[in-house]
Image (tube, rainbow, N blue to C red):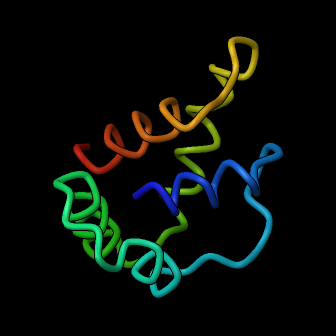
Amino acid sequence: MKDLVTYLLDNMYLDFQGEISLDTVRQFLRGDESREAKALLAKLIADKGVDDLLITLADCLKEHIRAGINEQTVREQLSLYSDS
């Protein structure tokens, strides 16, 4: 999960630049046995890809731009998305 959060933070500008697919997310989460990682992967599989995640995450993070977006903020938003 940490690698995925780092990737998203590094590539955020209002959208996420770079190619990210379900396979890419699987690679980032490989070896991560956390509940968060498993829930996120299950949600992405059910959604049949990452498109909804990226749109939702970008929209939700807009609310945090003034206060700052950091690893914890992205992690919280990913958890909220996977629980939805």
- Left/right placement of residue 60 relative to residue 18 reads left
- Left/right placement of residue 67 relative to residue 34 reads right
What residue is at 63 percent from the left and 20 percent from the top? 63
List x then y, in percent, for residue 42: 22, 68
Quarter of the image for residue 62 reads top right
List x then y, in percent, for residue 46: 25, 71
In the displayed structure, 34 sits above or below 41; it is above
- Left/right placement of residue 78 relative to residue 31 reads right
In the displayed structure, 73 sits above or below 41; it is above
Quarter of the image for residue 81 reads top left
What residue is at 29 percent from the left and 50 percent from the top? 82
Quarter of the image for residue 69 reads top right
Where, quadrant-wise, is the N terminus in this rendering? bottom left
What residue is at 26 percent from the left and 43 percent from the top? 84
List x then y, in percent, for residue 54: 58, 56
Find the residue positioned furthest to the top.
67
In the displayed structure, 48 sits above or below 82; it is below
Q: How many numbered discs?
A: 0
List x then y, in percent, for residue 76: 40, 34
